[in-house]
Image: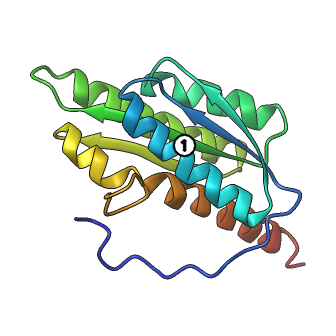
Amino acid sequence: MSGTGAPQAESIDATGLRVVIIAGTWHEVITDGLIAGAQRTLDAAGATSHLVRVPGSFELPVAARAALDGGADAVVALGVIIRGGTPHFEFVSSAATDGLTRVALDTGKPVGFGVLTLDDEQQGLDRAGLAGSKEDKGAEAADAAVRTTLLLRELANLQ
């Protein structure tokens, strides 16, 4: 399990931050768990959030760009891609990852990466923040987006 060694995060104040959660619609139980974890984290930090659903992980980058261009301070991108018997998995995983990275770099705003790339459904259930899950990747992605937003603001004021 990849959660070994995760940092212990202190609480943060994200009051006034506008964060858009963008989530795919595939693998509803896992995705809904990711959304719930992200929402809990943003609520606890005091951020204002808005949920947008897209058809799948391939559509995450374009929606993330629109949200950031529309005034969001950060985006939390959530999706579930499960390996199948064709190369489709590699194409969608790569497109989502590369696209979200490009959006963050092009806009200079954080994109919390909560796209699960899995070999099977159980791996997703173990990471979705559900009862019995070992990890909460939705919460982790939201926390990363908020902390990075605050860090970028701090760095912008170094002068």
Is residue 21 at least partly visible in the picture? yes
| In the image: residue 146, left or right of residue 73 | left
Quarter of the figure with the N terminus: bottom left
**Looking at the rendering, which quadrant does residue 10 occupy?**
bottom right
Q: Position of residue 30 (x, y in %)?
A: 38, 39
Give residue 79's position: percent from left, percent from top. 43, 35
Query: What is the quadrant of the C terminus in the image?
Result: bottom right
What secondary structure is found at the residue carrying circle 1?
helix
Q: Could you say which is closer to the camera, residue 127 or residue 108?
A: 127
* Residue 60 percent across, percent down from the top left: 53, 29
Instruction: Identify which residue is drawn at 46% across, 23% down.
Output: 25
| Badge 1: residue crowd in 10 Å (few <14, some 14–19, many ≥20) | many
Seen from the viewer's position, the closer of residues 121 and 159 is 121
Residue at position x 42%, y 55% in the image:
129
Q: How is the image coloured?
A: rainbow
Above or below, 112 relative to 80: below
Residue 101 can be seen, yes or no: no
Q: Residue furthest left?
A: 85
The image quadrant that residue 69 belongs to is top right
Q: Position of residue 140 (x, y in %)?
A: 50, 61
Q: Please give left or right for residue 72 compared with residue 102 in the image.
A: right
**Residue visible at 81% across and 66% down in the picture:** 153
Amino acid under label 1? Ile
Residue annotated with mark 1? 35
Q: In the picture shown, does residue 87 fall above or below 18?
A: above
